Amino acid sequence: MRRLSGKIVRDHVLERIKKKMQELALKGDRVPGLAVILVGSDPASETYVRNKREMCLSLGFVHFDYRFDEDASQDELLDLIDRLNEDDRVDGILVQLPLPKGFDENMVINRINPDKDVDGFSPANVGRLSQGQDCFIPCTPYGIMEILSFYGIETDGKRVAVVGRSNIVGKPMAMLLMSKGVDATVTVCNTHTKDLRPITMESDIVIVATGRPGTLDASMVKDGTTIIDVGMNRIEDSTKEKGFRLVGDCDYPSFKDRDVSITPVPGGVGLMTVMMLMVNTFKAYERRMGR
Ligand code: GUN
């Protein structure tokens, strides 16, 4: 088994952004600004939002932190988005998903100016991605493309199974993989797919994003397969200080003696998601500065 560390790739991308920030400092320009909105107190979302803030601060971006109780109104949230759309200090706006029950996620995402939609979730960006136009690429699939490229994993003409069809990962992932220049042959599966094994067995790359531990194990892939595990599942574990441990969607230990390459959880895709958010925020900044 070959472990595809996300940390090495993250640090590689981090250096690129740090260098750009040094160039800004020399010129005395304003720095990029990211607004992050969290509604409610889902523990996993709290962690993601904290990681985003820490990354912003360590890079020297301006970070605008907004919190709402889960019983806040949709109108309050939309009003804030309207104000952030108009705020010149804000280059990127991110609403942490999922939103609590009662919120209309589509309406909220739709309200974000597509030029500040650094998650790439708005219909304008999704449409641009599907047409191969310049856009904000959703951070997790974008990070996965960076991992594949960093480790020299060929996609041209290869068969790729994407297991999961979410708007955040599966769908944009499939779109990127089938795009010109990437040129993979993509099969998109989901948890209803009958008999996943023949599909994963003929795949050169398997990307697993179901949110279900054990979706893929070593009996389901051929030798030489590259496996990208997007899962981030909390499993109760009283031996851990926090009372849980993180596992992916793959049965990682089962691959131990196999000739496969696989991203670990934690330490794989998750690190890239936060990094690519910074890349997108920097891109939004450059565009807004007319560069
Ligand atoms: N929830 C899980 N992943 C993401 C993400 O990439 N962006 C946002 N906004 N919410 C998420």
Image (tube, grey):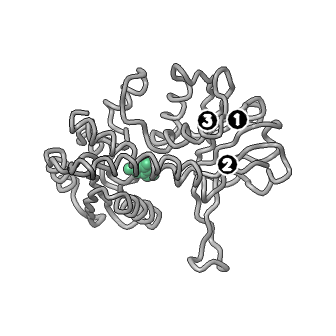
Counting residues from the start of the chain, the first of labels 2 and 1 encountered is 2
Circle 3: residue type: Val
| Residue 75 percent across, percent down from the top left | 18, 52
Residue, disc 3: 162
Whether the residue carrying mark 2 lies under 8 Å from ligand 1 is answered with: no
Counting residues from the start of the chain, the first of labels 3 and 2 encountered is 2
Lateral position of residue 11 relative to residue 75, left or right: right
Assign the C terminus to one quadrant of the image: top left
- Please tell me which residue is depicted at 67% across the width and 48% down the height of the picture: 4
- Please tell me which residue is depicted at 45% across the width and 39% down the height of the picture: 167
Q: What is the secondary structure assignment of the residue under circle 1?
A: loop
Q: Disc 2 and disc 1: Cα gap in Å?
A: 29 Å
Is residue 115 visible to the viewer in this orientation of the structure?
yes
Q: Residues within 10 Å of mark 2 (few under 14, many from 20)?
A: many
Residue, disc 2: 4
Circle 1: residue type: Lys
Q: Nearer the viewer, residue 106 or 50?
A: 50
